[in-house]
């Protein structure tokens, strides 16, 4: 039963084929069996069984929602009342959140069962899950490779069938890149579509939570539960939430696809390019027309992002000082010692690198040269997207330049690591929604197709992904040993 999609599980729960308690026990068993993947930081076994019992009662009354009784797992960046919320950091290793993130609350209200909290790069900074205080996560398709990051635990857990679905967050690619490397379906919504309340902040103007699932239909079901205005998040957008499942079967006849030539230049590995071309051809067969487009500012996305994201993180992470939150060093001699040692010992290397870069970029004398300049580039990138999306309905391309790389291969070279998000980062700077859709394999490793749409066009993206998943079965392959 762990191989089924949410839609199939919901049917099984209703027909009495299995109960939520049985389903939850099956997943808990698999989590133990495959603990060497290191996908979970915390498994909330007791709580999960309590929630499953309550879900079974709700199902019996006929007042259930699609997610009622479905075992989901939360990225450990979302605050969970009474449950450790570490954000992948030693700094928060002892933090028991006193409230639920809005996203968590919404899953609870829908009657979903939380299996536990998923491993991630420390404070969501990374592209390989190797910066986690809790150790690297392994990619179930090849345990010597990374699952991607920062939502690597989420992607590995969904791919290995250790949860029916999972939440992720995406600041520069952290839903789409791991989804691509693990062969699952991920969606980064429009900035403001999903509440950030209770989602530990990395770069507030870029962070966005979203679904990571086995299919586009499952992602639609999850987004339905997650999306919506939240008065507790001042950047959440007050627009009605459409029904994300109703248009899944709409025809793609006449769909205009744009392929930015910047996405297909040097740096893209040949085997990924071949898989992406084959996927585009499927769309041609489904009635789409394809044109090449030009987005000249895309090449500036990585440098602009690595000024803006560190700048925002240096401000957001200043609260972790050993006094108000987080780890406190042993026997401080005075206040300065308390601050410096708590932060020095509590944060990992990559987080410190970001704080240093961000503090530098924001300092008097450099602010105009770096931060303001980066903001101007951000504006140019947004305009590239607006222009392109007035000519075509969606933009397509690869999610990543290559398939999953080896554990240890890039962690010593930050620039090379940063380049693994070359196709995803611009989307966050513009704030538009984008998906990663399984589009085949290269040497046995999954490849992701990226589908980028206009602001709040999540329903259209889900429709486009779902139609592709009706004529291909890449999304339903399971890694060997995890079937
Ligand atoms: N890899 C990028 C970074 O380290 C993006 C991470 C993310 O989206 N959270 O900043």
Image (cartoon, grey):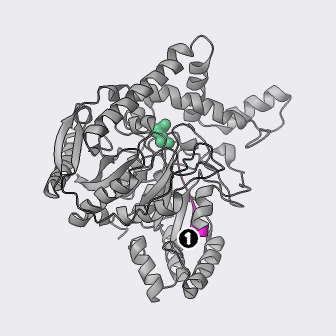
Q: Residue furthest top?
A: 365
Residue 56: x and y in percent read 57, 83
**Is residue 215 in sight in this rendering?**
no
For label 1, the crowd category at 10 Å Cα-Cα, with few meaning under 14, some 14 to 19 and many 20 or more, is many
Q: How many numbered badges does the structure rendering display? A: 1
The percent position of residue 447, horizontal first and vertical second, equals: 28, 51
Q: Considering the numbered disc 1 on the image, is that residue within a helix, a strand or a loop?
A: loop
Please provide percent x and percent y for residue 255.
Answer: 22, 51
Q: Residue at x 31, y 59 (%)?
A: 463
Q: Which residues are magenta?
A: 109-120
Q: Residue at x 62, y 67 (%)?
A: 44
Most foreground residue, 8 or 138: 8
- Judging depth in this view, the residue of 427 and 317 nearest the camera is 427
Residue 407 magenta: no
Residue 221 relative to residue 276: left or right: right
The residue under the point 22% across, 32% down is: 265
Q: In the rendered view of the protein, which quadrant contains the N terminus?
A: bottom left
User: Farthest right residue?
Assistant: 334
* Residue 115 located within the stretch drawn in magenta: yes
Dot 1 corresponds to which residue? 112
In-image side of 108 versus 160 (left or right): right
Q: Nearer the viewer, residue 202 or 410?
A: 202
- Quadrant assignment for the C terminus: bottom left
**327 to 60, vertically: above or below:** above
Answer yes or no: disc 1 within 8 Å of ligand 1. Answer: no
| Residue 10 seen from this side | yes
Residue 252: percent from left, percent from top: 22, 57
Q: Quadrant of residue 350?
A: top right
* Quadrant housing residue 43: bottom right
């Amino acid at each position: 039963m762990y191989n089924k999609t949410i839609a199939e599980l919901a049917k099984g729960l209703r027909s009495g084929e299995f109960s939520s308690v049985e389903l939850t026990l099956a997943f808990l068993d698999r989590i133990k069996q495959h603990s060497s993947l290191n996908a979970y930081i915390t498994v909330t076994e007791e709580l999960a069984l309590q929630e499953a019992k309550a879900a079974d009662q709700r199902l019996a009354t006929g007042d259930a929602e699609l997610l009622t009784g479905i075992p989901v797992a939360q990225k450990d960046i979302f605050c969970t009342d009474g449950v450790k919320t570490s954000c992948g950091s030693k700094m928060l290793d002892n933090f028991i959140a006193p409230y639920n993130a809005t996203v968590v609350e919404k899953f609870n209200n829908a009657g979903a069962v939380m299996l536990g909290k998923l491993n991630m790069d420390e404070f969501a900074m990374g592209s390989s899950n190797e910066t986690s205080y809790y150790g690297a996560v392994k990619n179930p398709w090849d345990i010597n490779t990374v699952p991607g990051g920062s939502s690597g635990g989420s992607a590995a857990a969904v791919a290995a069938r250790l949860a029916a679905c999972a939440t992720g967050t995406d600041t520069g690619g952290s839903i789409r890149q791991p989804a691509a490397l693990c062969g699952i379906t991920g969606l980064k919504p429009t900035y403001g579509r999903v509440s950030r309340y209770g989602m530990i902040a990395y770069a507030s103007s870029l962070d966005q939570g979203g679904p990571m699932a086995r299919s586009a239909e499952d992602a639609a079901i999850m987004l339905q539960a997650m999306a919506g205005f939240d008065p507790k998040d001042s950047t959440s957008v007050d627009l009605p939430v459409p029904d994300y499942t109703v248009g899944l079967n709409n025809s793609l006849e006449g769909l205009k696809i744009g392929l930015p030539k910047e996405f297909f230049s040097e740096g893209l590995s040949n085997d990924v390019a071949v898989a992406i071309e084959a996927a585009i051809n499927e769309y041609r067969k489904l009635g789409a027309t394809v044109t090449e487009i030009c987005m000249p500012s895309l090449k500036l996305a990585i440098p602009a992002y690595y000024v803006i994201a560190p700048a925002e993180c240096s401000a957001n992470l200043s609260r972790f000082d050993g006094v108000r939150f987080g780890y406190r060093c042993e026997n401080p001699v005075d206040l300065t010692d308390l601050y410096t040692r708590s932060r020095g010992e509590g944060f990992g290397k990559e987080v410190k690198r970001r704080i240093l870069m961000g503090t530098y970029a924001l300092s008097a004398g450099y602010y105009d040269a770096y931060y303001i300049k980066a903001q101007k580039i951000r504006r140019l990138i947004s305009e590239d997207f607006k222009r392109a999306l007035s000519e075509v309905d969606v933009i397509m391309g690869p999610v990543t330049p290559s398939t999953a790389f080896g554990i240890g291969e890039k962690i010593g070279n930050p620039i090379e690591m940063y380049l693994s998000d070359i196709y995803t980062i611009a989307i966050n700077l513009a704030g538009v929604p984008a998906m990663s859709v399984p589009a085949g394999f290269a040497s046995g490793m999954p490849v992701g197709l990226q589908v980028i749409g206009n602001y709040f066009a999540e329903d259209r993206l889900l429709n486009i992904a779902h139609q592709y998943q009706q004529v291909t079965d890449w999304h339903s392959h399971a890694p060997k040993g995890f079937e």
